[in-house]
Structure formats: structure tokens, C-alpha cells
Image (cartoon, rainbow, N blue to C red):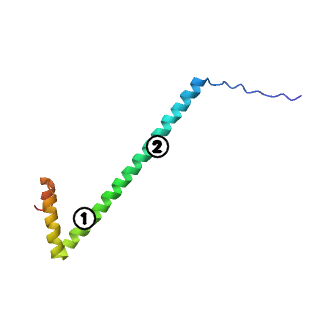
Amino acid sequence: MTDKKTKTRKRKTPEQQLAELETKEQQLQARIQKKRSDGRTQKRKQDSRRKIIAGALALEHMEHDGHFREVLGKLIDTTVTRPEDRKLFGL
């Protein structure tokens, strides 16, 4: 006859199982929220980078094209209202 070792596992109560599942759910929700936040952060960084590049191109183009300088200058003058921002453009 073969001697079988029997493992005695303590079964969890339904309440314990539920608590364990709720804990896992909370952990998963936290991971989902983190991923969403990371995605928004990445989009903001990309948007800022696009604005920097577009702004640099516009400022460079202003130096070479008088009509563009005049049009963009008027746009900046009429839309930029914060005093500290206006100072950046010499307004």
C-alpha cells in the first residue's frame, strides 16, 4: 500500500474570499488609474513639445518674412493679455 500524504488546506470562508477579491479589485483599479494618468501625462508632454517646436518655427519665420511678422505680431498683441506674457514679446 502507498502512503499518501494529504495536505490539509484551510478553506477560506466566503467572507474571506470576498475580502480577498475586493482587495484585488482595489489593486487593479489603482493600476488602471495609474495607466490612465501616465497616458494623460504623456499626451501633455507631447502637446507641450509640439507647441515649442511650432513656436520656434513661427519666431524663426518672423525674422525672414515681414508680412508674417506683421500678422503674427498683431495676433500676439490682441490675444496675449497677461502682463508677464506680453513682456516676453516686448509688448
- How packed mark 2 is, by other alpha carbons closer than 10 Å (few <14, some 14-19, many 20 or more), is few
Q: CA distance from mark 2 to mark 1?
A: 35 Å
Residue 3, quarter of the rendered image = top right
| Residue 25 screen position, x and y as percent | 51, 35
Q: Is residue 66 above or below residue 31?
A: below
Q: Secondary structure at mark 1?
A: helix
Q: Quadrant for the C terminus, please.
A: bottom left
Q: Earlier in the sequence, mark 2 or mark 1?
A: 2
Residue 84, quarter of the rendered image = bottom left
| Residue 7 screen position, x and y as percent | 73, 27
Q: Secondary structure at mark 2?
A: helix
* Residue tagged 2: 32
Looking at the picture, which amino acid does disc 2 mark?
A: Ile
Nearer to the camera, 23 or 18? 18
The answer to whether residue 13 is left or right of residue 44 is right
Nearer to the camera, 71 or 53? 71
- How packed mark 1 is, by other alpha carbons closer than 10 Å (few <14, some 14-19, many 20 or more), is few
**Badge number at residue 55:** 1
Q: Quadrant for the N terminus, please.
A: top right
**Badge number at residue 35:** none
